[in-house]
């Protein structure tokens, strides 16, 4: 019964965060990665997400792999496209590494070397705490699992 009540509360509770766009999220990440700093690896490689190569995967517009495994894109548009595609997979729950239930701090631990600074930068750019989940950012409703329903009956 208690789990059922928590589910009802989750559905009725107002969202405290405005829905974020993929573009705003991508721009916040690009800022945290140093894309806007002339001469940085993300800037030189036209890679706003500072994305690294994954074996067997090639992004449209990827021309090579630079130092440290970072992808070099043909132009900024290709780099932005790749970052947005990655974020869309995360938000849709289709990523093997990230999930919408992760906080920005959790995501930072897997995404960035200096995760504390990255999480603070991204959260500050978005105007939310780094304990905000991706689901909260994008107003994704909670996932109902069959075992929750069975236990509440």
Image (cartoon, helix red, strand yellow):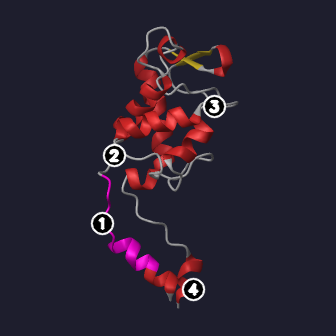
Residue drawn at 42 percent across, 40 percent down: 123
Residue 27 drawn at (x, y percent): 38, 30
- Mark 3 vs mark 1: which is more N-terminal? 1
Q: What residue is disc 4 on?
A: 150
Q: What residue is disc 3 on?
A: 57
Residue placed farthest to the right in the image?
Answer: 55
Whether 92 is drawn above or below 77: the answer is: below
Residue 6 drawn at (x, y percent): 45, 78
Judge left or right: residue 150 versus residue 84.
right
Based on the picture, tell me whether residue 52 belongs to the magenta stretch: no
Judge left or right: residue 147 versus residue 10.
right
Residue drawn at 32 percent across, 53 percent down: 17
Q: CA distance from mark 3 to mark 4?
A: 40 Å
- Mark 3 vs mark 2: which is more N-terminal? 2
Q: CA distance from mark 3 to mark 1?
A: 40 Å
Q: Nearer the viewer, mark 3 or mark 1?
A: 1
Q: Secondary structure at mark 4?
A: helix
- Mark 3 vs mark 4: which is more N-terminal? 3
In front of the other: 109 or 99: 109
Q: What residue is disc 2 on?
A: 20
Q: Nearer the viewer, mark 3 or mark 4?
A: 4
Whether 1 is drawn above or below 53: the answer is: below
Q: What residue is disc 1 on?
A: 14
Residue 137 drawn at (x, y percent): 39, 50
């Amino acid at each position: 019964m208690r789990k059922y009540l928590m589910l009802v509360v989750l559905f009725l509770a107002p969202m405290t965060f405005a829905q974020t766009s993929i573009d705003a999220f991508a721009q916040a990440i690009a800022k945290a990665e140093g894309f806007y700093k002339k001469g940085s690896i993300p800037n030189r490689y036209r890679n706003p997400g500072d994305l690294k190569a994954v074996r067997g995967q090639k992004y449209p517009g990827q021309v090579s792999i630079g130092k440290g495994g970072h992808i070099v894109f043909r132009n900024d548009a290709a780099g932005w496209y790749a970052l947005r595609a990655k974020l869309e997979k995360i938000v849709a729950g289709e990523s093997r590494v990230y999930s919408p239930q992760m906080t920005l701090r959790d995501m930072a631990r897997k995404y960035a070397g200096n995760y504390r600074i990255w999480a603070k930068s991204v959260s500050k750019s978005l105007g939310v705490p780094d304990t905000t989940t991706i689901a909260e950012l994008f107003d994704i409703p909670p996932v109902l699992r069959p075992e929750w329903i069975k236990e509440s009956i």
